[in-house]
Amino acid sequence: MGRTKSSKVLLMTKLLTKKETKMDKGKYEEFLSWRGICKEEGDIVCDKCNGSGISVYGNTATWSSSCGGNAMTRGVCDKCWGSGKSNAPWVNLRKVMASIKIKEADDET
């Protein structure tokens, strides 16, 4: 039985974040290709998540930086916002949340 896309990303994230693990370069390039990251086309791999689009945070607040619990939590990378590419990040969720709060404040007045 094959792995789902999300389980493959989680597995690769675990492998990439272990300092002692030496990943086969061919497998890493295959992973980047599977994620749609092509260095030959000018894509720059995110140096925070190594292209996985996922980071492990030290608390349950993850990318929101709000008050959080005491647990290691997997969430979207707050540098590339899940794209895996530092030169082409996806939507910045902090900016979206800030815009929503401003809109809500304006609606209340």
Image (spheres, helix red, strand yellow):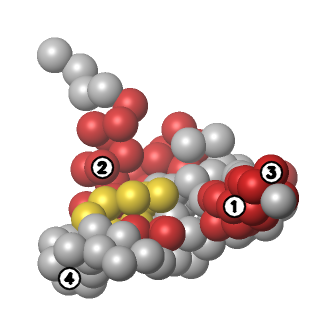
* Pointer 4 or 2: first along the chain: 2
Provide residue 59's location: percent of width, then percent of height.
27, 76
Q: Amino acid at mark 3?
A: Asp
Provide residue 95's location: percent of width, then percent of height.
73, 65
Of badges 1 and 2, the one in the foreground is: 1
* Residue 22 horizontal side relative to residue 5, left or right: left
Q: Which residue was labeled with disc 2?
A: 10
Compare residues 107 and 80 and report the one nearer the observer.
Answer: 107
Q: Alpha-carbon distance for marks 1 and 4?
A: 43 Å
Which label is found at residue 65? none
Provide residue 33's location: percent of width, then percent of height.
58, 43
In the image, what residue occupies the spot 64% across and 41% down?
36
Residue density around tag 4, few if under 14, some if 14–19, many if 20 or more, within 10 Å? few
- Marks 3/1 in contact by CB < 8 Å: the verdict is no
Q: Which residue was labeled with disc 1?
A: 101
In the image, what residue occupies the spot 20% across and 82% down?
20
Which label is found at residue 20? 4
Q: Amino acid at mark 2?
A: Leu
At mark 1, the secondary structure is helix
Q: Amino acid at mark 4?
A: Glu
Residue density around tag 1, few if under 14, some if 14–19, many if 20 or more, within 10 Å? few
Residue density around tag 2, few if under 14, some if 14–19, many if 20 or more, within 10 Å? some
Q: Is residue 98 above or below residue 69?
A: above
* Pointer 1 or 2: first along the chain: 2
Q: Amino acid at mark 1?
A: Lys
- Marks 4/2 in contact by CB < 8 Å: the verdict is no
Which label is found at residue 107? 3
